[in-house]
Image (cartoon, grey):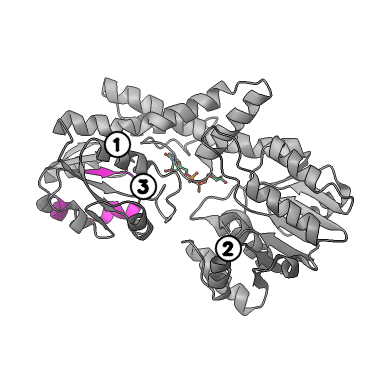
Amino acid sequence: MNILIIGVGYVGLATGISLAIKGYNVRFYDKNKEKITLLKNGKLPFFEPKLQKTLIESLNDKRVIFFDNFKEAIANAEVVFICVGTPIFKNGDTNSKDIEKVAMEIKKNKQGKTVIVIRSTVNPKVYNSIKSILSDKDFHLAVNPEFLREGKALDDTLNPSRIVVGTDDKLAKETLKKLYSSFDAPKIFTDPISAILIKYASNSFLAVKISFINEIANLSDKLGGNIDDIAKGLGLDPRIGKDFLKAGIGFGGSCLPKDAKNIVKYAKETGINLDIIDAASKLNDKQYKVVIRKLKQYLGSLNGKKIAVFGLSFKGGTDDLRNSVSFRIISDLRRAGAILKLHDYLAWIKAKELVKVTLVSNDPYLVAEDTDAIVIATDWNEYLNEDWKKIKSLMKGNLIIDGRNILDGGLLKKIGFTYEGIGRK
Ligand code: UDX
């Protein structure tokens, strides 16, 4: 089976390389020539170590080929996966320009029976638009949402919690059944709308879970409780589950914030209010402010205060800055007149191009030097292993606001820090 993957982001590469590992010949196309050149040379355009290793192996085994010419790439494809980004506008609507353009390119360049798989996250409006562009009887359409987490892109694709396929087309269904036959995962074959809603409901539920625990953390802060114990007590109920109950400054990334906002906006157009998901988004948009409040509580005015922000990526283990909560904190602190120094283990290089501040570095000691306070904004586990005694000796002040509740507050207090987590005693 000849497979073409359109779009070489996390989703496209993880999908294509997983299929190559399973023995398929996989072609990749992207309009971004720089990315294609990098990939031809065995380099991923982002940080994902396992995927990087398998990319090189797949290139050596000649199981994958990269193209920047659409016509050549699609020539003999039997299955085409659309994996391009579907960003949203500020009002929550999908910016479907790219995905619709891809559909038009397919229509223009492809003849003969082809199964077209929409792997990108699309709401029913965008799905219908793609469907009407690819209405020719030779195109057999299916929706096949992905559920991968950054940092675990390959594992999540090779060993998914479930495989969901939504289609009304017989050939598309049979082809995807065959394609995924060697994947050991529960498989759900359903209609396109249900598949689309499984994806939106999954990400929205995760968003709700995080905002829920953050709301309880805010109450715990007020009342003097300990959110770690509360989350543990809550999560041990098997009906609730312990995952995604880590309180903090809120969720970021390229999926949860976008999908929650997009489905609320789309549902509203159909006359349905998704109040719970909307509330989760709204709470998330302001949750980071807890850090600013806590800084002011100890430092008074932030004007002229030197503040280090530790963590710039949207979560630990990635260099992805998209929708990172750190940047909300940074812009509020700037507005308040603070002097900023920023740290990240990986994302510091990308961040350096985006923000002009006193210092952006991957050296936490250099960043901590002479500061009044440190804000932990990303859950990099590596922060646990830093020499906090040394950091304390380098700082002017002694305040740590741990926006991700990852450090050991008791230990830091012993060293002489004033420590504040989110909802932590
Ligand atoms: C998410 C979904 O997990 C994945 O299934 C989907 O396909 C894409 O979106 P990802 O964006 O990689 O994956 O990040 P995830 O690990 O889910 O974390 C999202 C955000 O939530 C991060 O900012 C993280 O710090 C935050 N988070 C996560 C919390 O604040 N608390 C938690 O308990 C879990």
Q: Which is nearer the N-term, disc 1 or disc 2?
A: 2
Amino acid bearing label 3:
Asp
User: Where residue 186 is drawn, which disc sits there?
Assistant: none
Examine the rendering and report whether any part of residue 425 can be seen: no
Write the residue at 69% across / 24% down. 270
The quarter of the picture where the N terminus appears is bottom right
Residue at (11%, 43%) from the top-left corner? 397
**For discs 2 and 3, the disc positioned in front in the rendered view:** 2
The residue lying toward the viewer, choosing from 160 and 97, is 97
State the extent of the magenta-drawn residues as a range: 374-391
Element at badge 3? Answer: loop
Q: How many marks?
A: 3
* Residue that mark 3 sits on: 379
Q: Residue furthest right?
A: 137
In the image, what residue type sits under mark 1?
Answer: Asp
**Could you say whether the residue bearing mark 2 is in a helix, strand or loop?**
loop
**Disc assigned to residue 32:** 2
- Point 35% across, 50% down: residue: 312
Q: Check whether the beta carbons of the residues at disc 3 and disc 1 lie within 8 A of each other.
A: no
